[in-house]
Amino acid sequence: MRLNADFSQRVAVHAATLPWVPSPTAGVSRRMLHREGDEVARATTIVKYEPGSQFSSHQHGGGEEFLVLDGVFHDEYGSYPTGTYVRNPPGSFHTPGSEEGCILFVKLWQFDPQDRTDTQLNIERMARIADARRLGVLVSPLYRDRREDVRVEVWTANAQIELDLPLGGEILVLEGGFAESGEVFTPQSWLRLPPGDVLRARTGWRGAKVWLKQGHLALTPGRAPAKEAEA
């Protein structure tokens, strides 16, 4: 399956308007944003766990990155409430599930193969730093290395937000919203801009909180597996 797999093209998906599609695991469904591979492969997905649902124990050969959008996610290492950002590097194992139900934003098989950095942060508890180069922008850094920069940004109300993306980038709306290229983006809307593009967004009266990642689109990860659990 190939869905929005051409990184040289602008892609916008308003996931909140899409139906939930059942996965092979009972109680787990998804809204696909980007996918390259078979049942589960290199992918960017909104995933919903019904209360009491669980995957069997598995390894993430290419790593996984996720943000808890709602509810509480858990595995044998702990519980992760709304706002938790997690990076499980290549080779990591866990048994994921949710007792009360949750919704996640998940990225699979998009790590540097040599990355071994575990990350667990809660974006609701992090400081917000004013961006000296862009008025009306507050930043909470989540992760940065030689190949990618991941952060949460809060954009003030009724503002024009610009950001050069020489290596491309993707944005997920967490709260509020913005307009870009004639489209309105609201929570669970996902925008991917190709290398060399410039983000030009206009926020509304509520402003916006977004998850933003850049740098990774110009790099090619290792080959994805034929099957791997989503979170």
Image (cartoon, rainbow, N blue to C red):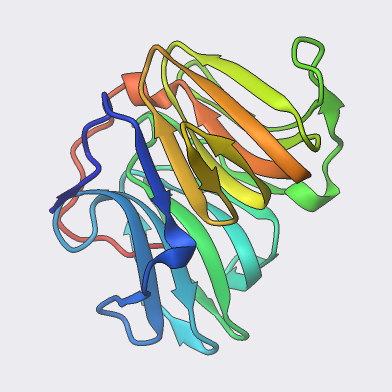
Is 64 left, or right, of 201 in this rendering?
left
Indicate whether 22 appears above or below 226: below
* Residue at image coords 65%, 32%: 202
Q: Nearer the viewer, residue 153 or 229?
A: 153
Indicate whether 30 appears above or below 129: below
- Residue 131 location (% of width, % of height): 79, 18
- Residue 134 location (% of width, % of height): 75, 15
- Residue 212 location (% of width, % of height): 57, 34
From where the camera sits, is residue 99 visible? Answer: yes
Q: Nearer the viewer, residue 29 or 112?
A: 29
Q: Which quadrant of the rendered structure holds the C terminus?
A: bottom left
- Residue 136 location (% of width, % of height): 81, 25
Indicate whether 45 appears above or below 137: below
Indicate whether 82 appears above or below 214: below
* Residue at image coords 58%, 53%: 186
* Residue at image coords 21%, 44%: 224
Q: Nearer the viewer, residue 115 or 110?
A: 110
Total residue callouts = 0
From where the camera sits, is residue 57 visible? Answer: no
* Residue at image coords 82%, 42%: 126
